[in-house]
Amino acid sequence: MAVISQAEALSKQRAEQGDPSFATTLAHGLDVLAAFRSRGGPLSNAELAEHTGLSRPTVSRLTYTLAQLGYLKRDTKGRFVLGLGVLANAYPLLAAIKVRQTARPLMRDFAAYAGGTVSIAMPFGLDFIYVETLRTTDAAPHVPDVGFSSAMSTTAVGRALLSLYTKDELEAYVTAMKAERPDETEYVARRTLPDIELCKERGFAVSLGEWRREIFGVAAPLYRTPGGDCLSVNCGIPSFRFSAEQVERECGPRILGLARSIRSLVEDATSPLRSR
């Protein structure tokens, strides 16, 4: 059965609304590229058609065009993988997020303490996406990198991000969840929303094996940029390193301290006195 993706659903919604400014073909092309986020490995035209809900002829035209432009390339078996054009376009965005460089020494120290992976995340629709990540060991069962994305609802880092949302933004998030991921609606009401409020109260969020059983997550909100972007910092900790009680009692306050230190560095770097 075809899986209707976010871009495909949005295309249909825009068409129903009669939005003449929405470029459906462009949305479909980006949807093909987005398929590689969730599937990971090489994909054939048939697999891309199944994933996106687009027809095989449409997918064939899109993959041909994307390959010609360097955003896709073929592997030895003729399937498609992402090309370097995707990375080239991402570089200016990553370079503009200055906190990545500023926070690295502090993140490295926390990673050494926790024996996990420390990352900075930003919202990406209903998900989060890592814009920086650092670890001091590869012993952890999960070692994400820059560009990794997952659901905000089940993760500490996602709840920390959502704690920075305005009331209207949070209501829009819940509405979008009901429309796009109805199976998760009850979970959001029962677990995610109360944890967001708890994060606002104590300054950090935890997720004890909810996303992956072997990973304990702890996160703290960082700040909103003048443009409204939200950032949070988190650490994914192998569950054998700390008990659930230790994560709450020790790691939570420490990640809150990390967030405060990062904010202080960013404020110092952007203050008028320092820029003269």
Image: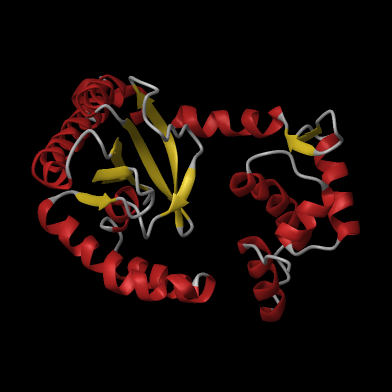
- Along the line of sight, the residue nearer the viewer: 241 or 83: 241
Which sits in the foreground, 52 or 210? 210
Residue 15 drawn at (x, y percent): 72, 75
Q: Quadrant of residue 269?
A: top left
Query: Which is nearer the eye, 51 or 174?
Result: 51
Looking at the rendering, which quadrant does residue 159 occupy?
bottom left
Image quadrant where one finds the N terminus? bottom right
The percent position of residue 225, horizontal first and vertical second, equals: 33, 44
Outermost residue, front side: 240
20 sits left or right of 200 in the view: right
- Nearest the viewer among 215 and 112 is 215
Residue 47 in picture, x, y percent from top left: 77, 52
Which residue is drawn at the image coordinates 33% and 55% (left, top)? 210
**Residue 53 visible to the viewer:** yes
Any part of residue 222 in sight: no
- Tell which residue pokes out farthest to the left in this image: 249
User: Relative to 160, does residue 142 appear above or below in the rendering?
Assistant: above
Indicate the position of residue 125 as horizontal and vertical percent values: 49, 57
